[in-house]
Amino acid sequence: MRELKQSLSETLRAVGRGQQVRVTVRGRAIADIVPAGAAQMDDPLRELVAGGRVVAPSRARPSRAPRLVKARRSASALVLSDREAER
């Protein structure tokens, strides 16, 4: 708990990146600090991160998917032109 008090800002940034922080007192777990809105289904993943078996992402997921751009030509036409160019 002393370490948490000393590095609260850093700890909250880590939680904001998706990491889970376990708070202990004399080696006994008393609380988990998790990202806001985290689903219960994420618990197995958090356990893997806490155990060092999985690395948490370095940045948060985007809030929405990227916008699709309309192409002038179809994908198959682009592939065919690339093949022709390689010959």
Image: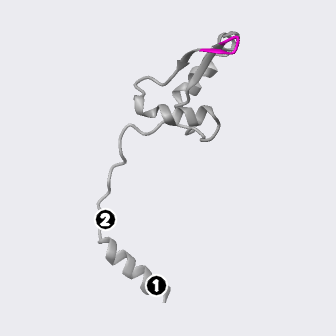
The furthest residue to the front: 28
In the image, what residue occupies the spot 52% across and 27% down? Answer: 16
The percent position of residue 77, horizontal first and vertical second, equals 32, 77
Q: Which residues are magenta?
A: 25-29
* Amino acid type at image mark 2: Ala
Q: Pick whichever of labels 2 and 1 is earlier in the sequence.
A: 2
Label 1 sits on residue: 85
Q: Quadrant of the N terminus?
A: top right
Which of 70/61 is in front? 61
In whole angstroms, how far apart are the C-alphas of marks 2 and 1? 19 Å
The correct choice, above or below, for 64 with respect to 79 in the image is: above
Q: Position of residue 43 (x, y in %)?
A: 48, 31
Task: Identify the residue at image location x=50%, y=23%.
Answer: 34
Q: Residue, x 46% and y 84% (percent of image)?
A: 85
Asked if residue 28 is among those painted magenta in the image, a careful observer would answer: yes
Question: Residue 21: x percent and y percent?
Answer: 59, 23
> Circle 2 sits on which residue?
71
- Using the image, determine if residue 11 lies above or below residue 25: below
Report helix, strand or loop for mark 1: helix
Secondary structure mostly seen in the magenta stretch:
strand
Left or right placement of residue 50 versus residue 62 in this view: right
Q: Secondary structure at mark 2?
A: loop
Q: Mark 1 belongs to which amino acid?
A: Ala
Task: Give 20 or 51, whichever is nearer the viewer.
Answer: 51
Q: Is residue 55 magenta?
A: no
Residue 60 location (% of width, % of height): 49, 36
Residue nearer the viewer, 1 or 79? 1
In this rendering, the answer to whether 83 lies above or below 19 is below
Marks 2/1 in contact by CB < 8 Å: the verdict is: no
- Is disc 2 surrounded by few (<14), some (14 to 19) or many (20+) residues within 10 Å? few
The quadrant in which residue 73 appears is bottom left
